[in-house]
Amino acid sequence: MAVPKFKDMERAYGFDEVALVPGNITINPDQTNIELTIGNFTFSIPILAAAMDAVVDPNFAILLHKLGGLAVLNLDGVQTRYEKPNEVLAEITQASANEVTSLLQKIYSQPIKEKLIGERIQTIKQAGATCAVSVIPATTKRLAPIAKEAGADILVVQSTVTTARHISKSYRGLIFSELCQTVAPMPVIVGNCVTYSTSLELMKTGIDGILVGVGPGAACTTREVLGVGVPQVTATMDCAAARETYHKETGKYVAVITDGGIRTGSDLCKAFASGADAVMLGSIMAQAEEAPGKGYHWGMAHPHPSLPRGTRIKAGIRAPLERLLFGPTSVTDGTENFVGALRTAMGVCGALTIEDMHKVKMAIAPAIKTEGKYLQSIQGMCSG
């Protein structure tokens, strides 16, 4: 007798379970075009630095701009709550593991100072850098107009899970279509989401970019605490499918940005083959010598007053930001020269542009990192 199903489940894939198939032609890596466009802004590398206090401060934003990428400054963080944020950051990094969560909850309970928003944005703008800022939905209506007035270029509205429809006790929540009109012509990026239907509905509100990923970040514990998330390859593919549908219907192209879960060059390359136009990096950027966290990294949901869903991790200081992005490097594990990895993978797969990279064939290959690598695994165990 056939047993009825209570619900259907689909198989979802993460970076470790898939592989890119080489192309029929190859291209010199230096001939590939990896530019990213968001609204009227174009960036020479499709890499964003996550809006986390351990990753981005004004100096880091200026540096990444000079290297061709885009850093997002957290307007709900220590940069806008404290006159001397470096002292607060030092307090966080020096705290013991047992006390750091309660300390973060205390630090982030201080009010945001509107004056500091303008000062931080102006520091970035006066250096000639593109300024992207991040707000959470709860503070968007208050902070977005201030950021626009101060001269911010791109607005990111970010929470663990974002939808176009939100049910709450408040009379009128955040409506993205109205927000886009309010801050125009400033491009609006919204996240995070992982499904086709939610992405498509968000795109129809007029946004310019969408962040993909729920819980894959190294410092995020949402998947452990809430059990919510979709592996990044499947999530990116589903959101990219929504981008294609919306583009065909309207002619407007919305950038899909894979946010979280990227550890190595191979993960980054697979994100683009899955349909990403850009990637947002957190823990990788936290390992840069210039990052304000000085080798530490913590999630944006860590300071939640009643249900923290993040943890402080010691990412370590690996290298200057320029070497992390462009090399040269002598490490063999794919944790440096991410731009070089992307260009080389595109060349091997015959992809001249990021759009071509979207068309690269992928294979389900859970053994891709272990097949034939017995001696590497043995040496790794011995060195560990």
Image (spheres, rainbow, N blue to C red):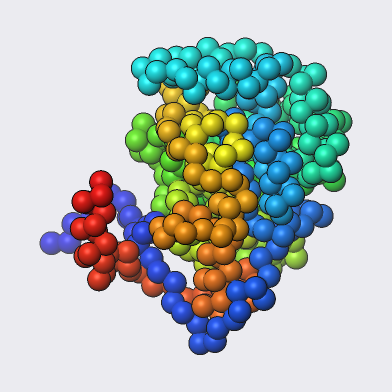
User: Could you tell me which quadrant the N terminus lies in?
Assistant: bottom left
Q: Quadrant of residue 253?
A: bottom right
Q: Position of residue 58 (x, y in %)?
A: 72, 33
Q: Image point 33% across, 55% down: which residue?
A: 9
Q: How many marks?
A: 0
Looking at the image, is 123 positioned above or below residue 34? above
Which is more toward the observer, 361 or 312?
Answer: 312
Q: Position of residue 89 (x, y in %)?
A: 57, 22
Which is more toward the observer, 151 or 82?
Answer: 82
Which is more toward the observer, 196 or 336?
Answer: 336
Seen as rendered, the residue at the extreme left is: 1
Res. 208 in view: no
Q: Image point 53% across, 39% down: which residue?
A: 286
Looking at the image, is 347 positioned above or below residue 232? below
Q: Position of residue 329 (x, y in %)?
A: 51, 58
Seen as rendered, the residue at the extreme bottom is: 24
Q: Quadrant of residue 320?
A: top right
Q: Image point 47% across, 59% down: which residue?
A: 330
Looking at the image, is 254 positioned above or below residue 321? below
Q: Image point 70% across, 63% down: which residue?
A: 35
Res. 74 in view: yes
Is 22 left, or right, of 326 in this rendering?
left
Q: Position of residue 324 (x, y in %)?
A: 56, 52
Q: Quadrant of residue 347?
A: bottom right
